[in-house]
């Protein structure tokens, strides 16, 4: 799961390319939040691959946005925004916050 997957879901394109597999932005954002919660190493990787710009796009996405963002309805837009913000918050956690369970 990379920023490419989130970008593709925001643009209603398949990921991997030519796979005919389409992700929904809220699901991809939630997956990124879960990955970020896993460990400090996961957060470093997500930072390094550059997920931030796509998360910002997910937060400001509007239904039928002129920039090509495709989100089905207001409820999905709200879910996408909430999960993208959750992912951002988890990415900002410090290493000391990560505990083994």
Image (cartoon, rainbow, N blue to C red):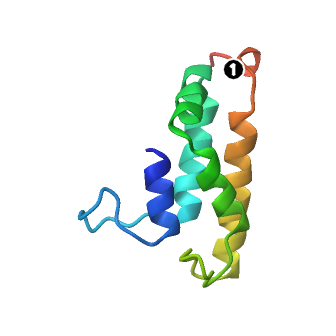
Label 1 environment density (alpha carbons within 10 Å; few <14, some 14–19, many ≥20): few
Q: According to the image, label 1 marks what residue?
A: 98
**89 sits left or right of 15 in the view:** right
Taking depth in this image into account, of 47 and 86 the one nearest to the observer is 47
Q: In this rendering, is residue 19 above or below 46?
A: below
Taking depth in this image into account, of 9 and 74 the one nearest to the observer is 9
**Spot occupied by residue 50 in the image (x, y as percentages of width and height):** 56, 41
Tell me the quarter of the image containing the N terminus.
Answer: top left
Q: In this rendering, is residue 4 above or below 14?
A: above
Residue 63 figure quarter: bottom right
Q: Residue furthest left?
A: 18
**32 sits left or right of 92 in the view:** left
Residue at 59% x, 62% y: name it: 26
Q: Secondary structure at mark 1?
A: loop
**Spot occupied by residue 62 in the image (x, y as percentages of width and height):** 68, 77
Q: How many marks?
A: 1
**Spot occupied by residue 77 in the image (x, y as percentages of width and height):** 67, 73
Residue at 70% x, 80% y: name it: 74
Residue at 61% x, 34% y: name it: 36
**Spot occupied by residue 90 in the image (x, y as percentages of width and height):** 71, 37
Tell me the quarter of the image containing the C terminus.
Answer: top right
Taking depth in this image into account, of 6 and 73 the one nearest to the observer is 6
Residue at 76% x, 41% y: name it: 89
Q: In this rendering, is residue 27 above or below 11?
A: above
């Amino acid at each position: 799961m990379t920023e490419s997957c989130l970008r593709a879901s925001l643009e209603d394109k398949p990921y991997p390319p030519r796979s005919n597999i389409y992700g929904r932005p809220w699901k991809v954002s939630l997956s990124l939040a879960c990955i970020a919660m896993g460990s400090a190493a996961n957060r470093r990787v997500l930072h390094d691959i550059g997920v931030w710009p796509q998360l910002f796009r997910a937060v400001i996405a509007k239904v039928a946005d002129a920039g090509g963002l495709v989100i089905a309805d207001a409820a999905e837009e709200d879910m996408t925004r909430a999960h993208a913000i959750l992912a951002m918050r988890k990415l900002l956690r410090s290493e000391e916050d990560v505990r083994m369970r």
